[in-house]
Image (cartoon, rainbow, N blue to C red):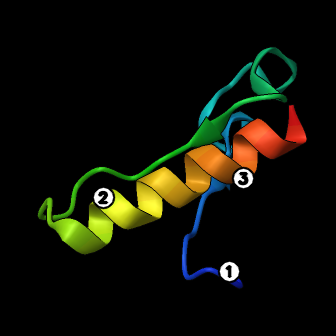
Amino acid sequence: MEKNISIAPGAVFSLSHSDYASYIRINCAIPWNSQSQRALTRLAQIANSLA
C-alpha cells in the first residue's frame, strides 16, 4: 500500500486455501499504461528482494 500497489493473498480466491498460501493475485482488469507498467515493475522488484 505504501507504493500504491494492492495485492491479495492467493488463498482468498481458492477453496483449497493451503494450496495457494504462498501465492498472490494481481488484478489485471485495468487499462495498461505507463503507471500500470511502473507498478508491476515495482512489485517484481519487491518480490525479488523478498526471495
Q: Which of labels 3 and 1 is toward the front?
A: 3
- CB under 8 Å between discs 2 and 1: no
Front one among 30 and 38: 38
Front one among 49 and 15: 49
Q: Amino acid at mark 3?
A: Ile
| Disc 1 target residue | 1
| Disc 2 target residue | 37
Q: Secondary structure at mark 2?
A: helix
Sequence-earlier tag: 2 or 1 = 1
Front one among 18 and 36: 36
Sequence-earlier tag: 3 or 1 = 1
The C terminus is located in which quarter?
Answer: top right
> Could you tell me residue 40's position as x and y percent?
44, 54
Instruction: Tell me if mark 2 has few (under 14), some (14-19) or many (20+) residues whose alpha carbon lies within 10 angstroms of its own.
Output: few
Q: Amino acid at mark 2?
A: Gln
Give me the C-alpha separation between circle 2 and circle 1.
17 Å
Q: Is residue 21 above or below residue 3?
A: above
| Disc 3 target residue | 46
The N terminus is located in which quarter?
Answer: bottom right
Residue at the (22%, 55%) spot, across then down: 29
Does 1 sit left or right of 37 as displayed? right
Instruction: Tell me if mark 1 has few (under 14), some (14-19) or many (20+) residues whose alpha carbon lies within 10 angstroms of its own.
Output: few
Sequence-earlier tag: 3 or 2 = 2
Give me the C-alpha separation between circle 3 and circle 1.
12 Å
Residue at the (58%, 54%) spot, across then down: 43
> For residue 6, which quarter of the picture?
bottom right
